Image: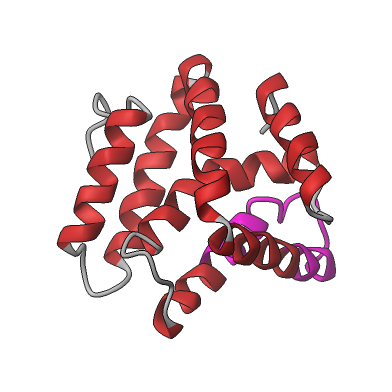
Amino acid sequence: MRSPEIDKLYDTYRRVKVCKVNNEQFGTLVLFFPALLVVACDGVVDDEEWVYVKYLSKFIADTFKDQLSEEEIAALQESMFAELEFLTKYLSDWEQKFLKVLKEYLAHNSHVKEDVVDILHMFAEASEGESDEEEAKIEELTNYLELSEINI
């Protein structure tokens, strides 16, 4: 996933943190970013939720399984986990930047909106169903990212 906005965010991000993922992989991280917000919606990522962050890094890496070897996928999964760990720690610094870029991307690539909705609900439901906090966060993200026309 690439766009001029994603590339600009990638450059900004790399000025702050050493990043082992390339532009396209970073774009996929942007696409999955709202799921991290759902996992962290209570403001704290506890031990159980770190398991879901690990799953999230695997899902992101697996989107490249047609392009990379198994070893490269494993390395990408580790790199994505490191990025997600960093983003969790500095969520307040990066949340609006990532969401703004994703919103701009989705405005021009509406075919991806359903994927974002599916990702949000998949990670919310993975933890014993959607909690009230998760539902509220999904509604907030749905409104901001203009995903409301997508039916699940």
Q: Nearer the viewer, residue 128 or 11?
A: 11
Please check the rendered image and state whether residue 65 is part of the magenta-colored stretch, yes or no: yes
What secondary structure is the stretch in magenta mostly built from?
helix
Q: Which quadrant is home to the C terminus?
A: top left
Tell me residue 101's x, y (percent): 56, 28
Please determine whether, in this image, residue 45 is positioned above or below residue 111: below
Residue 32 visible in rendering: no
Tell me residue 78's x, y (percent): 73, 70
Relative to 121, is 11 on the left or the right?
right
Relative to 81, is 55 on the left or the right?
left
Q: Nearer the viewer, residue 17 or 67?
A: 17
Relative to 16, is 28 on the left or the right?
left
Q: Nearer the viewer, residue 137 or 89?
A: 89
Residue name at image x 61 percent, y 55 percent: 60
Instruction: Write the start and end of the magenta stretch as one range.
Output: 56-76
Tell me residue 149's x, y (percent): 25, 24
Q: Nearer the viewer, residue 109 or 26?
A: 26
